[in-house]
Amino acid sequence: MSPLSGFLAVMVFFTAILVAYLTKQFQNENSNYLSTNPMKNSNAKVKTIEKEKIVAETLNGRFAMLGLIAAIGAYLTTGQIIPGFV
C-alpha cells in the first residue's frame, strides 16, 4: 500500500466517524428543539413530517459540504476531481 492510499484510507475512516457523530448529534438537537417548541394547532402526523424534513435537510447540507471538501482535497492531492479519471 502506498503512503497516499494509506493516508486516503485514514481520512475516509475519520470522515465516516465524524459523519456518524454529527448525524447522532443533530438528531438529538432536533429532538430537543421540537420537544421544547411544539407547534400549535397541528396534529401529531404533521409534527412527525416536519421533524423528518428538518433532519433530512440538515443532513443533506452536511453531506454536501463534506462532498465539496472531499472534491477540493482530491484536487489538491491528485490534481483531478475524481482521481483515476481524466
Image (cartoon, rainbow, N blue to C red):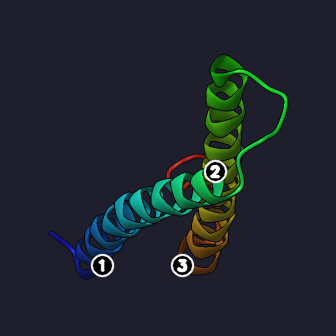
For label 3, the crowd category at 10 Å Cα-Cα, with few meaning under 14, some 14 to 19 and many 20 or more, is few
Q: Which of the two discs, 3 and 1, sits closer to the camera?
A: 1
- Residue 56 place in picture, x, y as percent: 64, 40
* In front: label 2 or label 3: 2
Return the residue nearer the eye: 26 or 41. 41
Q: Position of residue 41 (x, y in %)?
A: 85, 29
- Up the image or down, 14 lies above or below 84; here it is below
Q: Earlier in the sequence, mark 2 or mark 1?
A: 1
Helix, strand or loop at mark 3: helix
Residue 2: quadrant of the picture = bottom left
Residue 29: x, y in percent? 54, 63
**Residue identified by numbered label 1:** 7
Quadrant housing residue 33: bottom right
Q: Which residue is mark 3?
A: 77
Which three-letter amino acid code belongs to the residue tagged 1?
A: Phe
> Which residue is disc 2 drawn over?
34
